[in-house]
Image (spheres, rainbow, N blue to C red):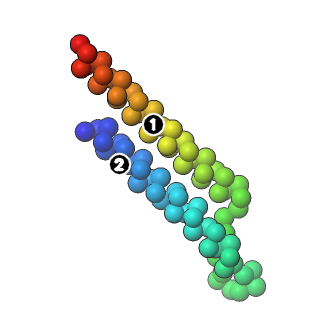
Amino acid sequence: MREMNRMHQVVAGLGVVLRIVGGNSVLEDEYDPAAPGSTPPLTKAAVGMLTAMAASMCEEMCGSMERRATFYNSEVKA
Protein backbone atom coordinates (compact mmCIF):
# COMPACT_ATOMS: atom_id res chain seq x y z
CA MET A 1 0.00 0.00 0.00
CA ARG A 2 2.92 2.33 0.72
CA GLU A 3 4.17 1.86 -2.84
CA MET A 4 0.77 2.83 -4.25
CA ASN A 5 0.60 5.90 -2.02
CA ARG A 6 4.08 6.92 -3.14
CA MET A 7 3.17 6.47 -6.80
CA HIS A 8 0.08 8.60 -6.25
CA GLN A 9 2.19 11.38 -4.74
CA VAL A 10 4.75 11.24 -7.54
CA VAL A 11 2.15 11.24 -10.31
CA ALA A 12 0.20 14.08 -8.67
CA GLY A 13 3.39 16.15 -8.41
CA LEU A 14 4.31 15.34 -11.99
CA GLY A 15 0.91 16.56 -13.15
CA VAL A 16 1.41 19.88 -11.36
CA VAL A 17 4.87 20.36 -12.86
CA LEU A 18 3.61 19.61 -16.37
CA ARG A 19 0.71 22.06 -15.99
CA ILE A 20 3.11 24.79 -14.87
CA VAL A 21 5.44 24.19 -17.82
CA GLY A 22 2.50 23.97 -20.24
CA GLY A 23 0.91 27.13 -18.89
CA ASN A 24 4.13 29.05 -19.25
CA SER A 25 3.74 29.17 -23.03
CA VAL A 26 0.43 30.98 -22.53
CA LEU A 27 2.17 33.48 -20.26
CA GLU A 28 4.85 34.00 -22.92
CA ASP A 29 2.17 34.80 -25.51
CA GLU A 30 0.15 37.09 -23.24
CA TYR A 31 2.91 38.92 -21.39
CA ASP A 32 3.06 42.64 -22.00
CA PRO A 33 5.77 44.37 -19.97
CA ALA A 34 4.02 47.70 -20.49
CA ALA A 35 0.73 46.47 -19.01
CA PRO A 36 0.44 46.78 -15.23
CA GLY A 37 -0.25 43.44 -13.56
CA SER A 38 0.87 41.40 -16.56
CA THR A 39 2.40 38.19 -15.24
CA PRO A 40 5.87 37.49 -16.64
CA PRO A 41 6.61 33.98 -17.89
CA LEU A 42 9.12 31.71 -16.21
CA THR A 43 12.69 31.97 -17.38
CA LYS A 44 14.10 29.30 -19.68
CA ALA A 45 16.30 28.18 -16.77
CA ALA A 46 13.25 27.72 -14.51
CA VAL A 47 11.42 25.76 -17.21
CA GLY A 48 14.54 23.64 -17.71
CA MET A 49 14.73 22.89 -13.99
CA LEU A 50 11.05 21.95 -13.83
CA THR A 51 11.46 19.70 -16.87
CA ALA A 52 14.51 18.04 -15.30
CA MET A 53 12.55 17.51 -12.10
CA ALA A 54 9.70 15.91 -14.05
CA ALA A 55 12.17 13.59 -15.81
CA SER A 56 13.69 12.68 -12.45
CA MET A 57 10.23 11.89 -11.07
CA CYS A 58 9.54 9.59 -14.03
CA GLU A 59 12.88 7.84 -13.58
CA GLU A 60 12.26 7.38 -9.85
CA MET A 61 8.81 5.95 -10.52
CA CYS A 62 10.15 3.59 -13.18
CA GLY A 63 12.92 2.39 -10.87
CA SER A 64 10.45 1.80 -8.07
CA MET A 65 8.20 -0.28 -10.32
CA GLU A 66 11.18 -2.31 -11.56
CA ARG A 67 12.31 -3.01 -7.98
CA ARG A 68 8.80 -4.04 -6.95
CA ALA A 69 8.41 -6.29 -10.01
CA THR A 70 11.76 -7.95 -9.29
CA PHE A 71 10.67 -8.58 -5.70
CA TYR A 72 7.34 -10.06 -6.77
CA ASN A 73 9.03 -12.25 -9.39
CA SER A 74 11.45 -13.61 -6.80
CA GLU A 75 8.57 -14.36 -4.41
CA VAL A 76 6.56 -16.21 -7.06
CA LYS A 77 9.52 -18.37 -8.12
CA ALA A 78 10.38 -19.35 -4.55
Image-based side of 15 in relation to 47, left or right: left
Amino acid, disc 1:
Cys
Q: Position of residue 31 (x, y in %)?
A: 69, 78
Q: Residue at x 71, y 55 (%)?
A: 45
Residue at far right of view: 34
Q: Is residue 29 left or right of residue 76?
A: right
Secondary element at image label 1: helix
Q: Are marks 2 and 1 in contact (CB under 8 Å)?
A: no
- Per the image, the residue denoted by label 2 is 8
Q: Quadrant of the C terminus?
A: top left
Can residue 32 be seen here? yes
- Disc on the earlier residue, 2 or 1: 2
**Mark 2 to mark 1 CA distance (whole Å):** 13 Å
- Identify residue type, mark 2: His
Q: Residue at x 29, y 25 (%)?
A: 72
The tag on residue 62 is: 1
